Amino acid sequence: MRESKQYNYEIPIVVFCQIPQGKLDALANLIKELSSAPYIFHLKEHLEGILIVPDNLIKPTVHEIAKTFLKKYSYLSDPTPPKAIAIPVEYESNLLCFIVMSESLLQSVDENNYHTLDFVMAVLEGLLYVQIYVIAWKDRGYLYPKTLASSFETDLFLLSSLIHDEYIVCKVLALILATDRLVETEERKIIGIIRSKEPIALILDASAIELAQIIARTLRDKIQQPWSMLMRCIWRHMFKPLARISGYDINLDLSKSTNKPNDSCFYRDYIAKYWDKIQEELESYYNRGLNGNESVLNKISKIIEEFLREVGITHSDIDKREYEVKFNKRFFDFIKTLIGQIH
């Protein structure tokens, strides 16, 4: 890691690159504005600092901060991290949070007019993630489960947590953008930025083919550890885009958008009935004031387990194995049809 310089604002900012003082002042001012709002709290108690690093060092920095967690669950992390990413660390019965920001994000800031949509969204999303981590930690007393019956259950719980975090953060972020005058912009521009660049239907249908390929390869080659590949596919290409787009859709009028999950055959035939249940649990949780975090994650885990069972992935206690991959004729017949439609 390069040499750093710390600036003692209300929330410390540690810089590992050359950033003009005026741009750092703009960041500190925006954080102060956002943290004084009713939807952001506990920052001083748990946010240890903001780290600004060169763009190519974001991922190594994140891994260094959270190396214990990411060493075991690296397949759940994003291969292309955003320009501002919040990292929670449980340390000596306490929760410490950091936000890692890219150099390019700060360099793009106009210190005299810093309420741009890109900048406000990046900083606000990082702060909201810290908020979500703090709420979860205070509610259930931990972030990363250590005592579940199997790694299968542990991974489903973590996947449920990721879905929960993405959905709630996007929901609150959209609500803030729709109601607060943080940025001067047209809603059309907001919609254009927050929507997936690639149509979500294409992402979901491609994920079905990828999932089938992983299952087929596992059955054919007797791969011993396909779980990480399965989880990566299910999170990155199915539930993450669904959580993000659905969280935004709740509070912004995107009903006329052509970018809809229902345009995906895989979504309609397999995912929709499970995603509807997950979204119902998340909305109920949100309406309860974000109380009962562990309960809702356990319910979502069970729903995901039902989805996995339908495509041929089941939990098994045979010979102490933690999961089984089976051939599901209906699913593979569906994949053949889907490939035929695409080509």
Image (cartoon, helix red, strand yellow):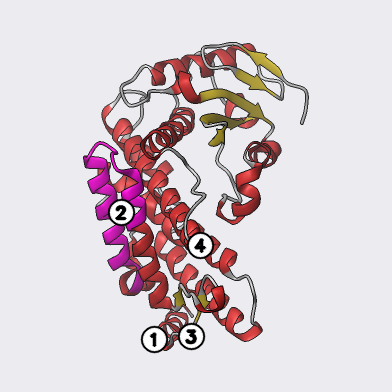
Residue at mark 1 to residue at mark 2: CA–CA distance = 31 Å
* Secondary structure of residue under mark 2: loop
Task: Give residue 51's position: percent from left, percent from top.
Answer: 62, 26
Classify residue 219 by image quadrant: bottom right
Residue at mark 1 to residue at mark 3: CA–CA distance = 9 Å
Relative side of 124 to 27, left or right: left
* Secondary structure of residue under mark 1: helix
Relative side of 294 to 230, left or right: left
Residue range corresponding to the magenta coloring: 270-299
Task: Name the residue: 24% across, 54% down.
Answer: 280
Vertical order, 274 against 1 (above or below): below
Q: Are marks 2 and 3 in contact (CB under 8 Å)?
A: no
Query: What residue type is disc 3 on?
Result: Phe
Q: To which residue does mark 4 refer?
A: 150
Task: Give residue 90's position: percent from left, percent from top.
Answer: 54, 35
Is 98 inside the magenta-drawn segment?
Answer: no
Q: To which residue does mark 2 refer?
A: 257
Task: Name the residue: 45% across, 84% down.
Answer: 332
Query: What residue type is disc 4 on?
Result: Ser
Q: To which residue does mark 3 refer?
A: 327
218 or 249: which is nearer to us? 218
* Secondary structure of residue under mark 4: loop
Q: To which residue does mark 1 refer?
A: 330
- Mark 4 is surrounded, within 10 Å at the Cα level, by few (under 14), some (14 to 19) or many (20 or more) other residues, namely some
